[in-house]
Image: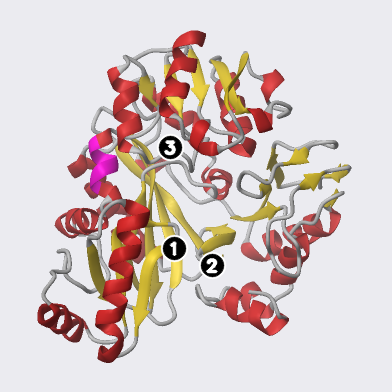
Amino acid sequence: MSFDTVLIANRGEIAERIRRACADLGLKSVAICSEADRDAPYGPKADRFVCIGPANAGQSYLNASAILLAARATGAGAIHPGYGFLSENAAFAEAIEQAGLIFVGPPASAIRTMGDKIAAKRAMIEAGVPCVPGPDTALPADDAVIAATAAEIGYPVIVKAAGGGGGRGMRVVHDPAALLDAVSITREEARRAFGTPELYVEKFLQRPRHVEIQVLCDAHGNAVWLGHRDCSQQRRHQKVVEEAPAPGIPADIAARVGAACVEACLRIGYRGVGTFEFLYEDGEFYFIEMNTRLQVEHPVTEMTTGIDIVQAQLRVAMGLPLDVTQAGIGCDGHAFECRINAEHPETLTSAPGRITEIHLPEGEGIRVDTHVVPGYKVSPHYDSLIAKLIVHGPDRATALFRMQAALEEMRIDGIHTNLPLHRAIFRDPNFRAGQTDIHHLEHWLKTQGAA
């Protein structure tokens, strides 16, 4: 399973992040780009830089054939998908393996199991992972059975697409009269968006937090969990701020759920890094899905555990055993991450353009993951994430103050960004007290006239 060259099948800050991890391990890197990203600053830093297609992601970053062709042409022995794009595409993982290359991620079988929300829930129940109340089977076509199932769970319920993700393919139903219409609309939406009309239904939790547990597994039967994160600051189901550890969660409860996540990984033959996502309410965890890839928010776990998660991914892909045990994993202090996007501060819509100047904060416990430099043109074709500002402190209070200072110091000129939003979040008394749920940020934005 050895290799010396990794093709990075992604763009932006995560492409630069993976390039650095490869360099630290003595591996060569191949960066790819679309025609819109020819001037990406990380390109010349890689050992090879290859354009694989037009700006349209479907013809470049989502074009599996073009990516495989680039890997063969450059002699890459492995492909790292980063996050987004093809990172959770089982067919892509299979195609890489069939080409005699190594996919830096889990086996295609594990991606398929966890990508199907019903199959994932069934696997989690078998492993003892706590799940949201509701059956581990798809909703039938029979209206009477659908109604009886929802009534047994108790309203409100949420109807979800089995193949969904990213906040799409779901509807909350508060009373029986609205149930069947919601099912019908969501079925059609699921069919169009995910290729299958299969749905399931669960209890809708009223004021939960979004808490994640990071796992790391090798091909030798070793698996560990790396603590937990709180990702409750969300807008339109997209995370804005993350922190580790999640505040106020008893250590014994977290350890019990973490151990169950490890057991689930061993049962499904998982390999590499992954994240179990939960809703957390009234002292209880409820599994919602697993992300079978690297997460945008992985730096806060790196800062609190001291483990380089991207390097760990690469080492596992090389066939090496984990060099950490569960007993050796601790939590050192507290970390926050702010996702800095090119957005209009009032409407929070994408704001592409050319960056004229950048001033990045410096100091103890401050880290910035970014691919942008002065003169860089933010493309309208892709996600608006341009940087991640991460801070670490010996405790949550210190990390809060450090993030406030770093946000005040950070400047990105020439384009609009969401820096004003982050500064406001870190002044919010409720957020500072660690007492917010997944609805808090959107409610706050509505009072400010933005949502």
Q: Amino acid at mark 1?
A: Gly
Name above or below for residue 85 compared with residue 218.
Answer: below
Using the image, tell me which numbered label, if any, was put on residue 86.
3
Magenta residues? 109-113
Compute the Cα span from label 3 to label 1.
18 Å
- Which residue occupies the foreground of this view, 138 or 293? 138
Residue beneath the point at 27% across and 49% down: 114
| Residue carrying label 2 | 236
State which quarter of the image contains the C terminus. bottom right
Using the image, tell me which numbered label, if any, was put on residue 167.
1
Q: Callout 3: 10 Å neighbours few (<14), some, many (20+)?
A: some
Residue beneath the point at 30% across and 39% down: 223
SS for dot 3:
loop
Q: Is residue 37 left or right of residue 178?
A: right
Q: Amino acid at mark 3?
A: Leu
- Which residue occupies the foreground of this view, 201 or 424? 201
* Earlier sequence position, callout 1 versus callout 2: 1
Name above or below for residue 20 compared with residue 296.
Answer: above
Q: Is residue 50 left or right of residue 438?
A: right
* Earlier sequence position, callout 2 versus callout 3: 3
154 drawn magenta: no
State which quarter of the image contains the N terminus. top left
SS for dot 2:
loop
* Earlier sequence position, callout 3 versus callout 1: 3
* Magenta: main secondary structure: helix
Q: Is residue 126 left or right of residue 190?
A: left
Residue beneath the point at 85% across and 51% down: 411
Mark 1–mark 2 CB contact (< 8 Å):
yes
Q: Callout 1: 10 Å neighbours few (<14), some, many (20+)?
A: few
Residue 292 quadrant: top left
Residue beneath the point at 32% across and 60% down: 190
